[in-house]
Image (cartoon, helix red, strand yellow):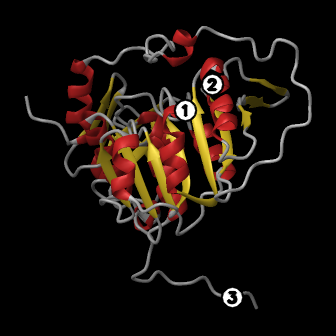
Amino acid sequence: MPDALPSPTAATPTGAELRRGPLLEGDRVQLTDGKGRMHTITLSAGKEFHTHRGRLLHDDLIGAPDGTVVTNTAGMAYLALRPLLADYVMSMPRGAAVVYPKDSGQIVMMADIFPGATVVEAGVGSGALSMSLLRAVGDGGRLISFERREDFADIARGNVRAFFGVDHPAWSVVVGDLVDALPGVVEPGCVDRVVLDMLAPWECLDVVADALVPGGVLICYVATATQLSRVAEALREHGGYTEPSAWESMVRGWHLEGLAVRPEHRMHGHTGFLITSRRLAPGVAAPRRTRRPAKGAYDDQPAEAADRDWSAEELGERPISERKIRRVRRDVGDGPAL
């Protein structure tokens, strides 16, 4: 006979109890109508969800099983489900742009984020990637996230707390620059994985090399080919990392209706590049590359172009207004009242 399923214990991972069982007050619920339109609400006793086609009582959902169908006052049916992590990330309040689920999944897999690992993340943004990393390291691991902006850190804390239900015990957020703050937070050679989501990751290679264990993985998420090239060359010049590997992923959904099976008109195309490398043991030199580079591959560029500071606007990122940041901080419950 097959083994019985293990019963929940006091060691249930953080947030797991919110992912199963009947819908409760305070749960986020994703409502989908017959045309596929989705709305996300937070259940509260006595409240109602209104559209131009009727209203839906929250009390009709509280206590109902996950995956139930309810009808509003106009007879419109809605499918009610707890949002998956991918759904939550794409609908949660955000200040900085989020790392898309397709890239978060690649980072967790290709960086080999394992339970119990010590992981350093730089560029926490709105907390989207942090949630995937926390699930991977588990309660017994450690995730240290660095963020330069206090307002972004507040938004990330609010989003992560809302998803897990509590402050995750494996997570700590440090407000400050990675280069300056990392040596004071971790001991040399004790970090298993480092994830960099920032404008100029090549500026952090020395401090990351000191923190990583031999064989540890560095993975960088960058938006442009210019950044990708700069990171790759900096890794090679450093001498303490293996030959870098880079790629991007694109996801295209399919329309499935009878015999009308075809690609969707829209897709998740380029969001960013991922580049990985591993830390060499101290005093070890990587084998020299034997293949001949393409002609013109290392065309010299002016020194001032290579060494100058980079801005988000130069890389095509849209500026984020202070007004939007204040509104998002209020939405996640970590901002000052106005």
Query: Which quadrant of the rendered structure holds the C terminus?
Result: top left
Q: Which residue is mark 3?
A: 3
Dot 3 surroundings within 10 Å: few (below 14), some, or many (20 or more)?
few
Bin the neighbour count of mark 1 within 10 Å (Cα to Cα): few under 14, some 14-19, many 20 and up.
Answer: some
Nearest the viewer among 105 and 179 is 179
The Cα–Cα distance between marks 1 and 3, rounded to whole angstroms, is: 50 Å
CB under 8 Å between discs 3 and 2: no
Sequence-earlier tag: 1 or 2: 1
Determine the image quadrant of residue 337. top left
Pointers 1 and 2 in contact (CB under 8 A)?
yes
266 or 243, nearer to the observer:
243
Q: Please name the amino acid that badge 2 sits on.
A: Arg
Chain-order first, disc 1 or disc 3 = 3
Height in image: 170 above or below 80?
A: below
Quarter the N terminus occupies: bottom right
Q: Which residue is mark 2?
A: 230
Residue at the far bottom in the pictured view: 1
What SS does tag 3 mark?
loop
1 or 3: mark nearer the eye? 1
**Circle 2: is it few (<14), some (14-19), or many (20+) Cα within 10 Å?**
some
| First in residue order: circle 3 vs circle 2 | 3
Residue 274's x, y, as percent? 65, 35
**Residue at the limit of the structure toward the left, as seen here:** 338
